[in-house]
Each structure stands twice: as structure tokens, then as C-alpha cells.
Amino acid sequence: MTVRDKKNVNKSNLKYIFVVGGVMSGVGKGVTASSVAKILQARGLNITAIKIDPYINVDAGTMNPTEHGEVFVLKDGLETDQDMGNYERFLNVDLPKENYMTTGSVYLSVIKKERNLGYEGKNVEVVPDIPLEVIRRINLAAKQAGADVVLVEVGGTVGEYQNILFLEAIRMLKQRYPERVGVVMVSYLPVPGSVGEMKTKPTQTAVRALNSVGVFADIIIARSTVAVDRKRKEKIATFCNVNPDNVISAPDVESIYDIPLNFEKDKLSERLCTMLDLSCKSRSELEDWKKFVRKTKNYKDEVQVAVVGKYFSSGEFVLSDVYISIIEALKYSAYANGLKPIISYLSSQEFEKGRPLSDLKDYGGIIVPGGFGSTGIEGKLKVIEYTRQNGIPYLGICYGMQLAVLEYARNVMKLKNPSTAEIDPKADHLVIDVMPEQREKIMGKDMGGTMRLGQYPTIIEKGSIASKAYKKLQIMERHRHRYEVNPKYISDMESAGLVFSGKSPDGRLMEIMELPTEVHPFFVGVQFHPELQARPLDPHPLFTAFVKASYESKS
Ligand code: GLN
């Protein structure tokens, strides 16, 4: 061990669980990692979860959602991957920015340290300096959380170049603390239609690829359409060098929330506790979780909600991942109301191409989610006008609120050529304008991580729909935007009937707008993203109120 390595030695008894993917992506590694964390939390352990994304982007904020799915904003404002949302939802905790890293962010800190003479004249090298920075960050996040166990999900699939330095970090840690590091590989076992038999070879190949970089799997989670039988478990065990009891069956499930319970059928928490000598409670405390899972299967009726967005199509495919937090938030609130959520994804562009707006009559409620740019905007505006005029419950989130304000300025206030500075900065009436502190950032093309991001307070007006939903007058919600309701138009808008029922404490920023209930049963727009704080065991009150209104509008 070199002097530089010794400096990084961690004397605590922290245990590390790495989750890596084999065979292919898209098999639910994030949900698997969240479920592993959940079952250990239920054994009374303090666990924190970290996501590593191998791309060069410093954070997820600069990526197009159709490339990478939803951008999940943490409480402290870091723009991250949707898996961070899964961890927060499963563990029912807020995670800090230290729990997320990308290749770009790791390199950036190493380079900054080098520029500040932090390496004291030494040659800075890809190995060991990059993996050491990864390890430093993992230890920091674990320390901050006071964790007994830190679970680290490494993005990507073994065998690709991109994540190799993160696998090297695992190898280095395991070499230092063989008893404190466990590796879980999430693999996929195809059942080819022509053969009708589950094939283990891709898993064997993936394990070999992992072994070739000096990392060995302790547990293999066998994702497949069906459960893995004992015979295949033994085969995987022989060829992949693990105990057959450490091959955990992970068949496709109706609901992702079944997964922690399924893992416990194969005694996964027991296996992990024994393997890493964790001081686990003898009983798993999953009662609340089980109660929630029961609600996902028993309901008195259905509620139909449509999300009208622009990021749905990718070639022939429909991508709902882009709005995953909204969808999950709707589910929790539907279950809390004893309802089964039926969620439809409608592309706003279709309404521009002439899809009849009367199609919206089928839905109890409509959501226009957050977004950027001008694509599909006219379609969204038409949809908002229709929901306003026809009394269909409406929830506008971020861009969905800004567009509701714009629609009002256009069709009710009849302003000439109103717009948002995001689409037409030269319009006659910029009812949505760039926030003053954002102007310079746009001019200087300083776009990464510079929006109004993270948690801010909102003061709610008594008697409003928002106050009835939240049952309190001061709330904290997470934000991600550059534009805002232009203060110049507020009093005219209020005279025209719009209610700004939530404002920043200094009264400057309009955070919630609504229409009075005498005019419309539920027409609410929020400048923040309530979906980011919805949890299975703690549904979001605004979604719960919206789902209730959506159900009532049809009954
Ligand atoms: N594009 C809008 C803004 O930047 C809304 C952002 C969003 O919906 N997240 O203000």
C-alpha cells in the first residue's frame, strides 16, 4: 500500500454493498438496489444509498430527458438520475448531493484538487487517483449519514469501458477490507420463445467480464420473466462461483413495490447480514410496507388521469420514465384514496396536429408536467384552455403552471401576443419572464446547475385550495426553473380572477396559482415539483387532493 493509499484508509466498521449490472441495462437495477437497501433498513440498519453514473456530464441536468429519463432534483438542488428518486421513495429519506456522482464530477474534483496543488507535486494518475476520489466520496456520504452500511449502485453494465474505474474502486476497497465489501450483480436470464427454457449463459459471460477486472460477485440477482428454479440456481452457482443460496430469484412483478417482499422470500437480508456480519434485528420490520403493497392491490374504484407531455416518443416507443416521479406520486395518492390509478400519456403535439380536444373528456383529471422549449407548447395551451373551460381538474407543474398563466393572459385577459421569454423574448407581453438572476447565466451560456434549484419555502394563502390540500400555510418544495410569473402583470391577473395562493416569503415569486372554486372545481398550477417529495408511505397532499378531485369529477 502506498503512502497515498494509506491516507485514505477508513478505520470505521462501515460496510459497503456494491450493486453492478450484468448482461444488459433496463432490467430494473435501480429498483433492485433500492429494494436491497429497503430490506436492510427494515432490519434496523442505518443505510444510505449512492448512485454512480458513468457519463461525463457533471450532473444529469444538461441531458435531454428522452436520452436519460427524468432529472431528479435533490433537496439541496443537485440534478441527478431518477434512481435517486427510487432510493428516496423506498427508504423514505431525503438524500444529499454527496450521494450522487458521475465520471465528470469525479474528474472535475480531481482536476480542481490538482490545480490547487492538492497532490503536492505528485504525478496524478487515472489509477489510483480517480478510484481513490470515488472511495473518498463514498466514505464522505456514509459518514454524513452516520451509516452502518452504504449501498452503491454502479451505473452501466459490466464489460463496457465507461464504468471500469468505478469497478476498480470496488476492487481496491475489497482488497483493503475483504470482510467489509459485498458485491451484488443484477443479471438477466432470458427465456427465448423458441426454446422455452431459461438460459444462464449470458450471466456466466457477465460474471467472467466482472472477474476480469478483479471483482467477484457474492450475490447474483437473477432477473427474468419467471422465477429461477433450484436447478438453475445450482447451475449459476457452479459456473459463477457463488453459493446457490446467494442466487436470488427476481421474476417480473406486477408492482415494483413487491420486490423487497420477494427478496425476503429468498432470505436476501439474512444472506447479506451473515455475509457482512451486520448487526441486524432478528425480525424484519416491513409491516408498513406490506400495508402499502396491499393497498396497491385492493381498491374500491378507478381514477383516470392523463399526463400531457412532449417527451413521450422515442422512435416507435413510448417513454413514461421521463415523468416517473409524477406517475409514482399519482399512484401513491390514488392508493391513499382507495383507488386504482389508470394513467394515460398523451403527446401534446398530437393536439397540434388536430387530435380532438373532446378526447380529454374521458379523464377525471389532466396534468401538464414540467418541460423546456417550444415543442408541443401550442398543444399544451389548447389542452389547458379546454380543461379550464370544461371544469376538468387540472394540475400544472412548473412549465404546466407557467403555461396556465399564459393561457389565461391569452384567452381570458385577451392580452395581445402574450408569451414566455423562453419561447419568444420579443413578444408584446412577457407574462412569464426570465428571473433577473438567471439573465446573466443565459447570456454567459452558464447553463449547467444554474437554474433555481432545490428546496425553497412557500407561504400559502388561507382558505385556498392549496391550503386545504396541504393543511398548513408554510411548505418546502423543490424547484427547477429559470423563468417566473412576471411581477409586472400580477395585479392585472389578480383583477382578472387568477389567484396566486402561494408566494415566496418575500412575496416576489409566484409559487402557486389557482382559480376560485366557484369558477372551477380544481385548477391549480405550481412553480415547484411536488412529485419529488411523494413517497409510498407518505403520499403528497397536493396529488392526493388532485386525485380526489379527479375521481369526484367523474362520479
Ligand atoms: N422551462 C421552464 C423554466 O425554466 C419550466 C421548467 C420546468 O418545467 N422544470 O422556468
Image (spheres, helix red, strand yellow):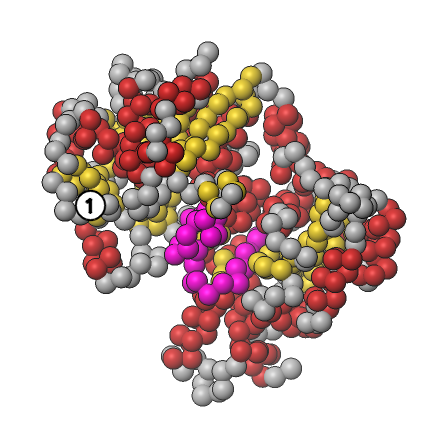
Up-down relation of residue 220 to residue 389 (above or below): below
Up-down relation of residue 319 to residue 204 (above or below): above
Residue at the spot x=14%, y=42% of the render? 427
Residue 141 visible in image:
no
- Label 1: few (<14), some (14–19) or many (≥20) C-alpha neighbours in 10 Å: some
* Mark 1: amino acid: Asp
Is 53 within the magenta? yes
Res 546 → quadrant: top left
Position of residue 445 measured from the top left corner of the image (x, y, whole percent): 27, 61
Res 396 → quadrant: top left
Q: Which residues are magenta?
A: 46-73
Q: Nearer the viewer, residue 342 or 154?
A: 342
Compared across the picture, whether 487 is left or right of 34 comes to: left
Q: Residue beneath label 1, please?
A: 424
Residue at the spot x=56%, y=81% of the render? 4
Residue at the spot x=20%, y=39% of the render? 419
Determine whether the residue tagged by mark 1 lies in a helix, strand or loop: loop
Q: Nearer the viewer, residue 274 or 479?
A: 479
Residue at the spot x=49%, y=46% of the render? 315
